[in-house]
Amino acid sequence: MNLSARQLRAFVALADEKHFTRAAQRCHLTQPAFSALIRALEESAGVRLFDRNTRNVELTAEGRVLDASARRLLGEFDVVVEDLRDHAARRRGRVTVAALPSLAAGWLPGLLARFHHDYPGITLQLRDALLDPCLDMVQAGAADFAVAAQRADMSDLESEFLHADRFFLVCRKDHPLADKTRIRLRDLGRWPLIQLARGSSVRRHLDEALGGAPTQPMLEVEHLATVTGLVSAGLGISVVPAMTLFHFRRDELAIKPLAGKPLTRPLYLVRRQGRSLSVAAQTLYDLLLEHREQIGAEQG
């Protein structure tokens, strides 16, 4: 038996009003259309649901069985519809974003705060992780989208360009490189180099740029805060993208641009290919795109 919400609402209206004309008016139907709806419901159920005479309309025993269930089903249906409307109106929802740590700590917080202010009913989740875990979360559906770089295998993912993140040298102000006006990437080979782990997008782009050029690796670490401490202590120099420079703005450190062809880390918004985002996720996605020009401005 196939019951529609329209039929159930007509049934409940008639059970309440006990009068076809009043029930039809309540459902905004003509009486013939309303009567046809009740008749179709009884035919579908295979039982008589109402006893009718010239004066009264009363539920039958089978009608009373349906009455309680019909009211419960309509209540649940209304809750579902209202919930859907809340999501469509961005009064409710959930968004999970995966982001590289440098983005999660530097550029994203202000925009996430703005989004939360505008849509306080939407639950935000931020997963900061290195490149592969970021993209794996999107592929697996554990994150709606990622703010990240690309990797060799971008299967089932689509990317929208966000920003070209330029690399800079960071060193102590008393380091010989701090006074040079023109520093090329190949000039760094003679100095101990503090590097991030190979799983990071920073390291992958730097290794590609160096192309096997000789370096003097000093230490390899997982976190930018550690790189900052090691460089500040004079244990070596490092090459990092602009979006990480807030870690290195210290009195004892120098931040120097690299001469020659710009070395950059392209960044993207990455989502599952061929999959629509929820209204909430699409709203945040669009907000990030709208403010991507701020990335370069905030690095000055």
Image (spheres, helix red, strand yellow):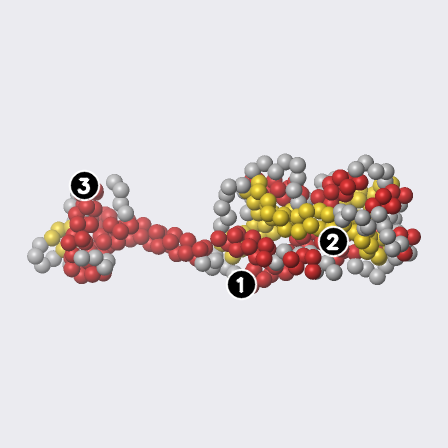
Residue 286, position in %: x, y?
55, 55
Q: Position of residue 162 (x, y in %)?
A: 63, 51
The type of residue carrying mark 3 is Gly
Residue at which label 1 appears: 118
Q: Is residue 215 visible?
A: yes
Q: Given the image, on which type of amino acid does mark 1 rest?
A: Asp
Distance between mark 3 and mark 2 Cα atoms: 72 Å
Q: Secondary structure at mark 2?
A: helix
Q: Earlier in the sequence, mark 3 or mark 2?
A: 3
- Residue on which disc 3 sits: 46
Mark 1 or mark 2, whichever is nearer to me: 2
Q: Which x, y percent locates residue 52?
A: 11, 53
Of marks 1 and 3, the one in the foreground: 1
Q: Specify the quadrant of the image occupied by residue 222.
A: top right
Which is nearer the eye, 73 or 150?
150
Dot 2 corresponds to which residue? Answer: 242
Image side of residue 203 versus residue 132, left or right: right
Which dot marks residue 24? Answer: none
**92 with respect to 172 (left or right):** left
